[in-house]
Image: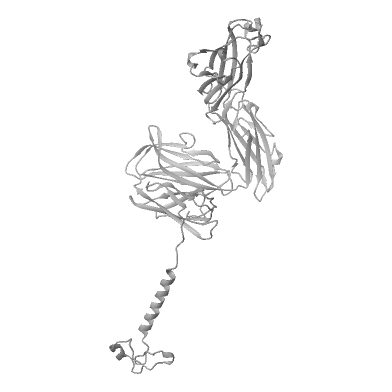
Amino acid sequence: MDDQIFDDKTRQELPVDLNPLPGGRVSIFKNKKVMIPVGVGLVLLAGIGVYFLITSKKTSTPTSTNVLLQIKGPDQLTSGNEAEFRIVYRNGENADLVGISLEAFYPTGFTFKSSTPASTTFSGQAYNLPMLKAGGNAEIVIRGKLSGSTGEDKEIKARLHYKLSNFNSEFAVEQSIHTSILPPNMTMDINGPVDVVNGQDTTFVITYTNVSAQDFQNLAIQVSYPVGFSFTSATPTASKNNNYWTIPKLASGSSGNINITGSFTGDSSQDKLVRADLGMLINNNFAPQLVSTATFRIIPSSLSLTMTAKPDKYVKLGDTVNYVLKYSNQGTIGLNNLVIAVTLDGTAIDFNKVSGQSAIVTGHTLTWKAATLPTLSVLLPNESGEISFSVPIKDNLTTNLKNQAITATASISSNEITQPTKAAPLVLALVSSLDLTVDGNFVSGAAPMQVGKSTVFAMTLTLSNSSNDMSNTVVTASLPLPSSAWKQSIVPDSEKDRLTYDPNSGKIFWRIGTLAAFTGKFIPVLQVTFQLEVIPTEADRGKSVNLLSNIQATGTDSFVGQEIQTDNIASVSTSTIDDDVMNTKGTTVQ
């Protein structure tokens, strides 16, 4: 059989003997040796073909165009400054998202500070997220510090993994944000313990530095405390509100510290976020330039104390606030000689009438010790107790200080735990109160009133306000007389535009708007007088005449945002106005 595969040259290099092997196969040898290079090449070609055949069928994780991912953050950031990056994701599918997790990828120079919700890793790069309903939105807030060279581009990337509740495949969507680094002028950090004992004082330090070549003037630092933080002290002393410090001058290369001491109260393992803003004072307005945050995690105390109050939000003049203290030993050893102390603050408190069960009252402080309350001698593990006390509020204020509140702070200690554990402080706002009176006087006409004859009365509304400014203040009254009774006579002139009568509804409106605190006490009362004409009919004979009904004042307390209203005055008649002429001549129709 002629060979038609090899050319003449190759044929000459093959052995002379080309006898076929059994099965028709040909054995190719040269000098009785296998041609190894040819065999290896054939094997490699076969392997490569199989590899491409397999990999060509492999697909990447699918994505859905209906699940959206977005990262919101600053386009530019001063090197060393801290920022918030909000990762927002939306479920535009018709099914719920389940098995949701997120990966975060940070650039070099990024320092993770905290996040909401908390990450499953200390580096803040992994998050397990709850189910997201169809059409729902959710977000992750990541706080971190970015540092780098001027002009450097920093990319933060997020990848969301999820499944659809009606489909088993896993999907993923990615998004990124770029932030350009600006040259730094100042730096600021908050340093303190990671874990803080619930209710016990801890100290953290705010450090700020001018890293520029120029001096800065008129700076300030403002600190935002979380719910459950109770301020104790600071060095240096705050300029105002225990959270604001002015810095007249910060020279180039110089630094400063603010040491803040206070207690955090909350649930075990709860994170508490403290934020500090460093800014400039421009025309006495604070303009933030730099931000820093720190997260403190609460760990339980062996000695627990809670405080509740009724009422629990607002108090009125004349109220009595009833407090309850609950204490317990959550440790493993008994505690001896417990001391509980409560300090009260507020000019509206009637301190002479403060009382507490077995309490030692000294000035503004109530103290309970084993000497007066034997149950405080020993508190075994898992034991608890309860104490109550009452705080009366004055009936009247003697000061013109508005927007007042009463504050109660409580602490507990023992021989074994000498550092006091504090309860969350309670602050109750003092709401304002309105007082409305209605007076009537005979002006002219028939006295006593007679059927078919005119009698004119002057009706005076007097309104006063206690401790807080009021907004949207209005007095309404119904006129149970014919529309012709309204005489359009209003005094003083300044109230003519605010006092109106609506003949369709039969109502009188005195739209005051803003009513200053202490109207009627430290500033004159607000009054308006208008005239009504009464012409009795035969049906009125022998009866007194109703002049006004359903009279009430309402307004919004600007301090607490609560609507305040006076008691409704059901009726004012000729027999109730207590006018001398009518009392002498008669209050009924003749």
Left-right relation of 468 to 328? left
Q: Which quadrant of the figure contains the C terminus? A: top right
427 w.r.t. 304: above or below: above
Q: Position of residue 6 (x, y in %)?
A: 32, 87
Viewport quadrant of the N terminus: bottom left
Residue located 48% across and 40% down the image: 224
**Residue 146 point in image, percent of width and height:** 40, 50
- Foreground: 479 or 288? 479
Looking at the image, can residue 353 be seen?
A: yes
Using residue 316 as the reference point, say whether residue 32 is left or right of it: left
Left or right: where 48 falls relative to 477? left
Total labels: the figure holds: 0
Residue 121 visible to the viewer: no
The type of colouring in the image is one colour
Residue 138 location in percent, x, y? Answer: 50, 48
Name the residue located 28 percent from the left edge and 88 percent from the top edge.
Answer: 9
